[in-house]
Amino acid sequence: MTRAEAADLPDDGARKTPDRLRQRASRQLSQLTTRSDRLINEGLARVDARKWHYAVLASLQDCGPGSQAELSGRTGIYRSDMVGVLNELAERDLVERAPDPDDRRRNVITISARGGRHLRRLDKVLDDLHDELLAPLSPTERDQFVQLLTRLLDHHTRIS
């Protein structure tokens, strides 16, 4: 339990966060994001992976090969950080780099067969972690929650 979590529970176990704060969606999302990030990062670390590894491999599997710049746009990973992520994945033979036939200054990144197998293993790890994160919700509520989050994110992505 973090200090922030401990500070929210007095000795009698009753929550002491003011209702005014608990009724703010932004605060609730922020608190949940903190807990979600910790759960996912720790869970992936146990299998020697990071969330950015998963994002790149999933993007390559679902959308096909791409340049570093395209992968940055697809995943939200800064271009300057993408090089390091791709280096880690290439060192593990999870992706392959090849010169772009249309522009020799760029590389095209492709998921390898080993990367595809690793991605399936990470899918299972993340499924289990999401079950833990969303434990209080029924399967129907989980689907609805993800749909609502997607709608909010799509809206704010379009206007920014």
Image: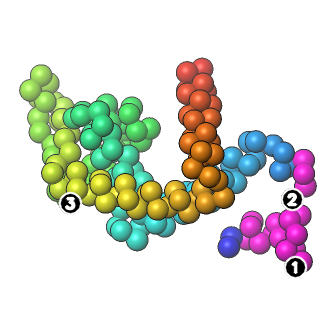
Instruction: Determine the main secondary structure of the stretch shown in magenta.
Output: loop
Tags 3 and 1 touching, CB below 8 Å: no
Residue farthest to the left, as pictured: 101
Task: Please report the residue visible at 86 percent of the width from the left and 65 percent of the height from the top.
Answer: 15
Name the residue that disc number 2 marks. Answer: 17
* Mark 1 secondary-structure assignment: loop
Does the segment drawn in magenta span residue 115?
no
Q: Position of residue 2 (x, y in %)?
A: 68, 70
Going by the numbered disc 1, the residue's amino acid type is Asp
Indicate the position of residue 55 as horizontal and vertical percent values. Answer: 38, 46
Left or right: 36 in relation to 76: right
The picture quadrant where one finds residue 111 is top left
Check residue 92 in the rendering and tell me which mark sits there, or answer none. 3
Kind of residue indicated by mark 3: Arg
In the rendered image, the vertical position of residue 9 relative to residue 52, given as above or below? below
Looking at marks 3 and 1 on the same chain, the residue that comes earlier in the sequence is marked by 1
Asked which secondary structure carries label 3, the reply is loop
